[in-house]
Amino acid sequence: MKSKHFVVPFLAALMMFTPYQSVETEVDASKEDTSLNHELDQILQNEKLNGALSGISIRLAETGEVLYEKNADVRLKPASNMKLFSGAAAMETLGPDYTFQTEVWADGDIKGNKLHGDLYLKGKGDPTLMVEDLDAMAQSLKEAGVREVKGDLIADDTWYDDVRLSEDISWNDETRYYGSQISALTVSPNEDYDAGTVIVAAYPSEKEGEPAQIELTPETDYVQVVNQTETVPADGEKDVTIERKHGTNQIIVEGTIPTEGSRSRSWIAVSEPTGLALELFKQSLTKQGIKVKGDMEIHGNTPADSELMVSKESMALEDIYIPFMKLSNNGHAEVLVKEMGKRVHEEGSWEKGLEVVEDYMSDIGVESDTLRLRDGSGMSHVNMIPAHEISELLYQVQDKDWFPAYLKSLPVAGNSERFVGGTIRSRMQDTAAQNNVKAKTGSLTGVSSLSGYVTTADGETLIFALVFNNYLDDVEDIEDEIAVTLAEHHLAPSE
């Protein structure tokens, strides 16, 4: 598909040199578009945008024709709209049926029920691996007759490089779930699949003055929880903070929680997720009665002559895209970038993966020369993408065989079901945009974006890309107003 730009200024220039009557037909035919332009111009006069930058690009989905634009060629920070790019490139490069593998290898001879050698847990990027999967793998090992490992238990995360964080992650984000370290071997605490994190929950104790009760998911000694909380009277203040101390796996829980108060809960990114995966696998082996005589070691490399004992396959990529896009999972985006680098260039790194993304953008007609891509998730404040290239991407991918899965993964406005509405489930409710707008959100400090698809009141599908930078007050209401305006609009002239 190639875009066609509708040049509105040409009409005005033509009217300067042609009698009005001779262009009457053109004026009448464009009346509705002019009305839309006026409405959008008025919305963008909001005082919240004073001193801010607004990049707007709106196209017909059928032809790619540009209906409205404002600063659409200006490079802006896209925040998580970056996932539209990494997500499209991964769908094309890996395919919707692609799966990730996690394997257990034995390096040594099995005599009787004993492995006389080392046991390797090898990760190949699965961001959906959970404790239940490790338990199942341990059980399979038991069913294969192994009851004891005479050697060491070793984690192999060499499928990707050992760079854990993309280069622009800030200090404040490093311990948060959305800034988790990226490893080829990592475990998620629940079905949101925030890999490389643990969930820390604080509950009030029955008696005042006692520390809160702490619950850790998954249960592990890999992190150390320091409980500095106090349970206070029922009418007391709830003020609990849960933080990981940088450079350690020490998690400090402090503050007050009322006796009848609700829990406080946080997802905390661990330092070195490979080690957490290995610790949890050791627990799984123990639950199955399999003893490990040797030590535990991370960052090992599975010997070529090892024997594959167990292999676990992830869900298909199109299913991973539901939590990835709906919940805007940063870790999934970065894993996809490294996986593309591994598959195309045999190097699981950000550099090689982003090279694949840029090459794909060039192949489909997006102007890659005007992009600056630094990660897959949009966490970087150095990413720069014009609104026109976002809408161009969304136009070009419509004819791909994987597009239905891609479209299905986008959040749906006003749909309260979490894995349908996603990040816009509470937005645009009771409007023409509800269950109509399908769009990816993006949010950083001073950055907000919303880009996707909307059907107008007369059944035409539009593509829109809205990117706002450098504002001081929240601008989601402006994004919503634009999306609702598009949903209510009639493109065809009324009879």
Image: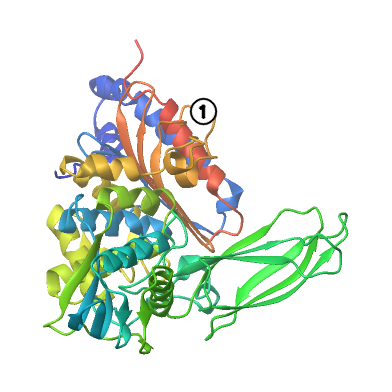
Q: Position of residue 14 (x, y in %)?
A: 25, 34
Q: Is residue 13 shown to the viewer in this render? A: yes
Circle 1 sits on which residue?
431
Could you tell me which quadrant the N terminus lies in?
A: top left
Q: How many marks?
A: 1
Q: Is residue 231 above or below residue 407?
A: below
Q: Is residue 414 above or below residue 94?
A: above
The residue at the point 36 percent across, 65 percent down is 134
Q: Is residue 412 above or below residue 179?
A: above
Could you tell me which quadrant the C terminus lies in?
A: top left
In the drawing, does residue 378 fall left or right of residue 444? left
The answer to which quarter of the image holds residue 29 is top left
Q: Residues within 10 Å of mark 1 (few under 14, many from 20)?
A: some
- State the colouring used for the structure image: rainbow
Identify the residue at the far front of this view: 112
The residue at the point 33 percent across, 67 percent down is 138
In the drawing, does residue 332 fall left or right of residue 17? right
In the drawing, does residue 17 fall left or right of residue 129? left
Q: Secondary structure at mark 1?
A: loop
Identify the residue at the far top of this view: 495
Q: Position of residue 369 (x, y in %)?
A: 21, 66
Q: Is residue 354 shown to the viewer in this render? A: no
Which amino acid, mark 1? Thr
Q: Nearer the viewer, residue 150 or 307?
A: 150
Q: Position of residue 42 (x, y in %)?
A: 51, 38
The residue at the point 39 percent across, 51 percent down is 323
Q: Position of residue 365 (x, y in %)?
A: 16, 53
Q: Nearer the viewer, residue 460 or 160?
A: 160
